Image (cartoon, grey):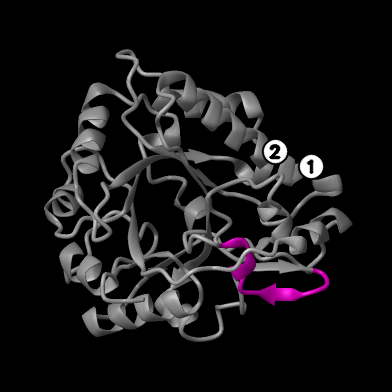
Amino acid sequence: MRKRTKGLLALLFSSALAVTAGSSSATAATSTATTRGLEIGVPAYVWPGDPMLSGLQAATPAASIVILNPGNGDTAFTPAWQAQADTLRAGTTAAGGHTKVIGYVHTDNGTRPLADVEASIDNYLKTADGKLHVDGIFFDVVSRDCGTANSTRDYYFTLRQYVQTAMNAIDPAAQDLVVDNPGTAIADCYLDPAHRTADTFVTYEGSYADYTGGGWLGGNVFNLTSGYYSGASFDPSGTSFWHLVYNVPDEPRMRTALDTAFARGAGYAYATGDTMPNPWDTAPSWGFTAETSHAATIG
C-alpha cells in the first residue's frame, strides 16, 4: 500500500495553463460561498489496528474525513478493514456529524481503464454483507487538465456517477462523498455544475516549506482566461477544497498551516510532521485532538 506514494504526493503541475475552451463555461457559476469553519481530513495509509488509527479513534473531536488505503484500492476490503471503517465512522466531529470514511482508488491521471477503476470502487462498495462500510471514494493521481474536448474531465465525471449509482443501489439514503486529488489547483471545467466530478478537490499537497513559501500557486482553480483564482464561486458549502501539508516542524506551525488553509479557501485540511516518502503513515507528534480542536476554532 506504500509503493504508490508518488501518486498522492505528486503536485501535478502542467507546463502551461492550457485548458479547452469548454472549461471557460464553468466560470458562469454564480453561487456565493458561505462562512464555514475548517474541518480535518486525514489520509491514513496504514493497516487495520495501526496506532495511527487508534489515535484517530480516540480524537475528540473526531476528524471529519479519514481515507483508508488497502493496497491502493486493489487489496480486498476484508471484514477487518470493514470493522476498522465502522469504528472510525462512529466518531463525532466538531460539527456534530460522524466521521466519513472514504476508500482510496488510483486513476493514473485519467489513463487507467474505467473498468479497472470501477473494479477498485466495487472493492469498497460491493461487500459480501451487502452493507456500506464507507461513505465514498477518494480518487488519487487525478489529472488537473480538462483534456481534448473535456475528455479527461468527463472520465472523472463518469466515475463520480458510477459511485453515486452504486451507493444509491445499496442504500438510497446514503450521502456519497467523492474526492478528486490532483494535488494542485484544478481546471475549473471540473467544477462545471453540469459536469462536476467531485464534491471536494485536494488542491494542495506538499511540504510546509512550500506551502508557506513559493509552492502555493495562488488559487484552488484555474483557467486560461482567469489564471489561478480562489474558486469561491463554486463553493457555496465551503467544502470544495482540501489542503494536505506534511513536514510541519512543530505544533505552533501546525496551527499556522491550518489558519493558512482556511484563509486560502480550504474547508478541509491536515497538517502533519510526517515526512517523505510516505507522510501519511504516522500520527502527528502533537496528536489528532490538538489538530481537530484548533480547526474547530477557525471560521
Q: Position of residue 4 (x, y in %)?
A: 47, 46
Disc tally is: 2
Residue that appears at 66% across and 29% down: 113
The residue closer to the viewer here, 135 or 34, is 34
Relative vertical location of residue 17 with respect to residue 123 in this rendering, above or below? below
Number of residues whose C-alpha sits closer than 10 Å to that of mark 1, classed few (under 14), some (14–19) or many (20 or more): some
Calculate the distance from the C-alpha at mark 2 to the C-alpha at mark 1.
6 Å
The reply to whether discs 2 and 1 touch (Cβ–Cβ < 8 Å) is yes
Q: Secondary structure at mark 1?
A: helix
Instruction: Work out which quarter of the rendered image holds the C terminus and state it.
Output: bottom left
Question: Would you say residue 226 sits in the magenta stretch?
Answer: yes
Judge whether 208 appears above or below 161 on screen.
below
* Residue 190 within the magenta-colored segment of the rendering: no
Q: Residue at x 22, y 34 (%)?
A: 86
Task: Tell me where the magenta segment starts and ends, as one range.
Answer: 224-235
Left or right of 249, for residue 102: right
| Location of residue 287 by image quarter | bottom left
Residue 128 in the figure: left or right of residue 149: left
Residue behind mark 2: 155
Residue 238 percent across, percent down from the top left: 48, 64
Q: Position of residue 189 (x, y in %)?
A: 73, 55
Instruction: Name which residue type carries label 2.
Output: Tyr
Disc 1 residue type? Answer: Ser
Q: Residues within 10 Å of mark 2 (few under 14, many from 20)?
A: many
Q: Is any part of residue 111 visible from this angle?
A: no
Q: Residue at coordinates 88% horizontally, 58% vertically from top-left?
A: 21
Quadrant position of the N terminus in the picture: top left
The answer to whether 205 is drawn above or below residue 170 in the figure is: below
Q: Which mark is residue 151?
A: 1
* Pick the front one: 164 or 220: 164
